[in-house]
Image: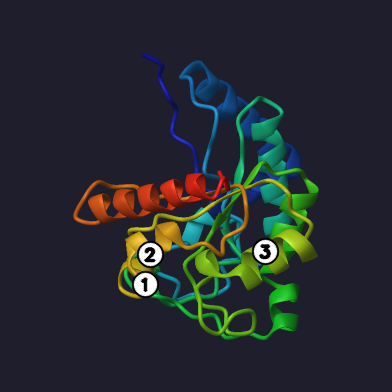
Amino acid sequence: MHRQSARPRPGGRDAGGRSGAAWEERGFAATRAKLGINWNFAPVMDVNNNPDNPIIGVRSYGADPELVAQMGTAAIRGYQETGLLACAKHFPGHGDTSVDSHLALPVIPGDRRRLESVELIPFRAAISAGVGAIMTTHILFPALDAERPATLSSGILTELLREQLGYDGLVITNCLEMKAIVDTVGTAWGASHRRRPARTVRYPSFPGSDELPVHLRLSSLFAAGISRRAV
């Protein structure tokens, strides 16, 4: 058994600066490697600029996009230089919400210019730092897609993330059993939605009433792909 020491949350760690963050995350990654863990769903690259946000809080590095970018990329390098795959989340941003996407579908109403000046700064930095994975968020961004939350939006995941930001790594959805998906399109439809880009991992996390419909839906799509020689 490996003894693990407690670590401060990201929101309380900016005092040590980028070098301190990278050094600390290398140590964290090394202990995880001893446990056989090779992928960490971190860092949180959300800009925590809404005091009414009920879910991000100190999981974020703060309310300054540049600080979040600097500290987040330091963490990414610290993880990945030690062999632990990093995952920047929650693209394209979950900071400026007053709704928890575990419980309902949040909306961020800012225009594209505003998104570029706040939410997207840390994710651009993460991509430049070579982050190995990016996790999507179940939030509606009307300036980018007025109909579908980011997880299900080709306009956000293909046009913005892949084509405009030039990201070519792995994309993983946030949990598909969160209410932002369950109460809008349903987990089964969300898990099988065809418009997500290639190299996207679906993430239904907990067994429950949605598990069988999800497996049946994915099995039927896989079989259809084989019949068309598309798999």
166 to 92, vertically: above or below: above
Q: Which residue is mark 3?
A: 158
Q: Which residue occupies the foreground of this view, 4 or 108?
A: 108
Q: Position of residue 109 (x, y in %)?
A: 57, 86
Occupied quadrant, residue 98: bottom left
25 to 137, vertically: above or below: above
Q: Position of residue 12 (x, y in %)?
A: 55, 51
* Left or right of residue 216: residue 113: right
Q: Inspect the image, locate mark 1, and give the three-letter code of the amino acid beneath it.
A: Val
Q: Which residue is mark 1?
A: 185
Q: Which residue is mark 2?
A: 189
Asked which secondary structure carries label 2, the reply is: helix
Quarter of the image that includes the N terminus: top left
Q: Inspect the image, locate mark 3, and give the three-letter code of the amino acid beneath it.
A: Thr
Asked which secondary structure carries label 3, the reply is: helix
| Residue drawn where x is 49% and y is 57% of the image | 58
